[in-house]
Amino acid sequence: MDKAEIRKAAMKRRSGLSSEQIHEMSVQLLAYFIQQDLSTVNVIHIFLPIEKKNEPNTFLFIDWLQQHHPNIKILVPRADFDTALMTHHLYTDKKGLEKNLYDILEPQSDHPHEGQIDLVLIPLLAFDKRGYRVGYGKGFYDRFLQNIPTKKVGISLFSPVEEITDIDQYDVIMDYCLTPDGVYTFI
């Protein structure tokens, strides 16, 4: 299947989930995240959930990191929809976030992080068994991940599809992907 077909099916499937199901799946995702080796991680980028799109609750990950790994810097993105680029800002707390015009929570800090990022948690709608992903189609994460040496970890509510058929040179393979049912490793 191509990205457009996969995207449409995944969005429909996700929209059918209740808030209780999203919460339970997010707790299961966190259980697999907790098992990951974070000993070499100093800076982690985490996407913030878009509730109306039934995204996994990554605030659970943030809260766990702040409690168990307070030395790890947590960055969250701010999107520029004119350029399809993101900046990355230090997360302090929910009070420093506001919704943008697209109803996405973003940091209000004007001081983006410029240094290395050791691990990126990547939002996605679907992924395949080779480690390619389907997002919303704007390319923010593909541009961001194109040439940086970081560990790339997808966060998915569902198991992989067999194959995304229209992969191009801009698509980036994830290192692994967490699902409520387990961890899929690609590299």
Image: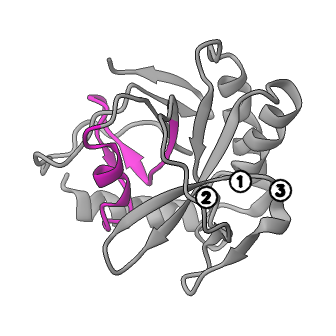
Amino acid type assigned to the residue bearing label 1 in the image: Ile
Query: Which quadrant: the C terminus?
Result: top left
Q: Can you give x and y, in whole percent of width and height, for residue 158 in the image?
A: 51, 43
Q: Residue at x 26, y 40 (%)?
A: 172
The residue closer to the viewer here, 90 or 174, is 90
Residue placed under numbered mark 3 in the picture: 93
Q: Which residues are magenta?
A: 120-147
The kind of secondary structure element at disc 2 is: loop
Mark 3–mark 1 Cα distance, whole angstroms, equals 22 Å
Mark 2–mark 3 Cα distance, whole angstroms, equals 19 Å
On screen, residue 162 versus residue 96, left or right, reads left
On screen, residue 38 versus residue 183, left or right, reads right
Residue placed under numbered mark 1 in the picture: 22
Residue placed under numbered mark 2 in the picture: 55
Amino acid type assigned to the residue bearing label 2 in the image: Glu
Q: Can you give x and y, in whole percent of width and height, for residue 67 in the image?
A: 88, 32
Q: Is residue 121 magenta?
A: yes
Q: Residue at x 85, y 25 (%)?
A: 68
